[in-house]
Image (cartoon, grey):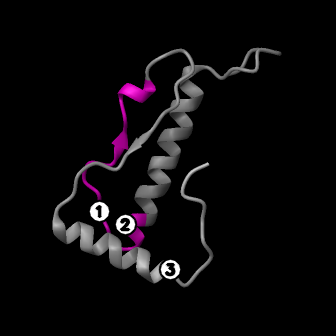
Amino acid sequence: MATAGSGQQATGDGIGDAERARAELSDALNAAGVKLPSLSLDAVSCAGTAPRVLIDLGRCNMATAHALAAALRLRGAGPRWEAAR
């Protein structure tokens, strides 16, 4: 939550946004047949008064890596998205 005129978000807002982004990514991956078992928020990046929360994609086995690559290739014919902002 921001205080009036402060221009800063409370920690909970950034983490909540990141949790929603992680859930959105998980849902999209699951719809494409890909399950990343370690998909989570990076705990270290959640620390501090104004965290810049990162989503940790985690580790996966070769079968999951191949499934993810195939899902991304299917999407390759569509519009391109910015990788990072």
Q: Residue furthest right?
A: 5
Q: Is residue 72 left or right of residue 20?
A: left
Residue 61: x and y, percent?
Answer: 16, 62
Dot 1: within a 10 Å radius of its alpha carbon, few (fewer than 14), some, or many (20 or more) residues?
Answer: some
Residue 71: x and y, percent?
Answer: 39, 76
Dot 2: within a 10 Å radius of its alpha carbon, few (fewer than 14), some, or many (20 or more) residues?
Answer: few
Q: Which residues are magenta?
A: 29-46
Is 26 rendered above or below residue 56?
below
Residue placed at 51% from the left, 40% from the top? 18
Residue 10: x and y, percent?
Answer: 61, 20
* Mark 1 / mark 2, whichever is N-terminal: 2
Amino acid marked by disc 3? Gly
* Mark 2 / mark 3, whichever is N-terminal: 2
Quarter of the image where one finds residue 47 = top left
Q: Are marks 1 and 2 in contact (CB under 8 Å)?
A: yes
At numbered mark 2, what does the secondary structure look like: helix, strand or loop?
helix
* Mark 3 / mark 1, whichever is N-terminal: 1
Residue placed at 54% from the left, 84% from the top? 77
Q: Quadrant of the N terminus?
A: top right
Q: Is residue 70 magenta?
A: no
Q: Is residue 16 left or right of residue 40?
A: right
Residue placed at 26% from the left, 48% from the top? 38
Residue placed at 40% from the left, 57% from the top? 26
Q: Nearer the viewer, residue 27 or 50?
A: 50
What residue is shown with label 1?
35
What residue is shown with label 2?
30
Q: Is residue 42 magenta?
A: yes
Amino acid marked by disc 2? Asn
Image mark for residue 76: 3
User: How far is the residue under mark 3 from the one under mark 1?
Assistant: 19 Å
User: How far is the residue under mark 1 from the one under mark 2?
Assistant: 6 Å
Q: Nearer the viewer, residue 81 or 25?
A: 81
